[in-house]
Amino acid sequence: MERILEPELMLGQEQSLAYARADFEEPHRRVLEEFQSVFGDELDGDVLDLGCGPGDITLRFARAYSRTRLVGIDGSPAMIALARQEVEKEDALKGRVSFIEGIIPDAQIPPLPWQAIVSNSLLHHLHRPEVLWETVRRCATAGTRIFIYDLRRPPTPQKAREFVELYAAGEPEILRSDFYHSLLAAFEVEEVREQLEQAGLDLTVRPIGDRHLVVHGVM
Ligand SMILES: C[S@@+](CC[C@H](N)C(=O)[O-])C[C@H]1O[C@@H](n2cnc3c(N)ncnc32)[C@H](O)[C@@H]1O
């Protein structure tokens, strides 16, 4: 099955709210567990979260690694507003987590010595995936840990529909539809391997479970 693009930014108010309210407890816990299994329990300093959406992954990193400062970037004003509301609810995280509205690759990303650059579910949104790898290359310095987690494209639309039934059965229709289109827009492992090769990035890519992939390594 060929990749079918979906809109790059999640700009809609209703769409952003449905995404922010969705139950991502299990998949997002797995993202953190995978990071910990690759990089261990020690992480401090500045961490960049690309395509942070409403901030759930950003906040999970901040909670898991208490000596980090997190910066989340997203091109959707609705998503950034939701992310800022979330951090306001947790006194312990205020001052350690901030969000910037900006579209990759043009976003104004502070030139900090990033200890880690992380991202979940951004890659499949990008019409030109190379902008993610250009951004990683531009923002990373020697020793930056890179961790990009995403959906993996299933072999057929039928399989994508099965995943929607299996993993989003009780979710609102807008979320189910987004999930379906995200699966069709996602990359296969081999395609990501080619992107990394073209970008000259020496990172590992491998499948995770039935519908995800992860890219990781140290610059
Ligand atoms: C599926 S959401 C993932 C949000 C979050 N990382 C998570 O795991 O919950 C993808 C996000 O990427 C953002 N996005 C897509 N293309 C982008 C770009 N070029 N620059 C910045 N953000 C982008 C969208 O607006 C959306 O909020």
Image: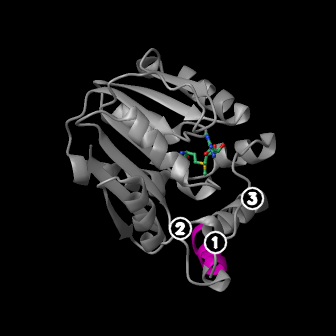
Horizontal and vertical percent for residue 91? 46, 17
For badge 3, the amino acid type reads Pro
Residue 164 on the magenta segment? yes
Q: Earlier in the sequence, mark 3 or mark 2?
A: 3
Disc 1: which residue: 3
Distance (Cα) linking label 1 and label 3: 24 Å
Residue 10 on the magenta segment? no
- The quadrant the C terminus occupies is top left
Q: Nearer the viewer, residue 23 or 80?
A: 80
Image check: 109 left or right of 175?
A: left
Asked if 172 appears above or below 78 in the picture, the reply is: below
Marks 1 and 2 close (CB-CB < 8 Å): yes
Per the image, label 3 sits on a secondary structure element best described as loop
Q: How many marks on residues?
A: 3
Asked if 213 appears above or below 128 in the picture, the reply is: below
Disc 3 crowd, CA 10 A, few/some/many (<14, 14-19, 20+): few
Disc 2: which residue: 187
Distance (Cα) linking label 1 and label 2: 7 Å
Horizontal and vertical percent for residue 202? 29, 55
Per the image, label 1 sits on a secondary structure element best described as loop
Q: Which residues are magenta?
A: 160-169
Nearer to us of marks 3 and 2 is 2
Disc 3: which residue: 172
Quadrant assignment, res 6? bottom right
Marks 1 and 3 close (CB-CB < 8 Å): no
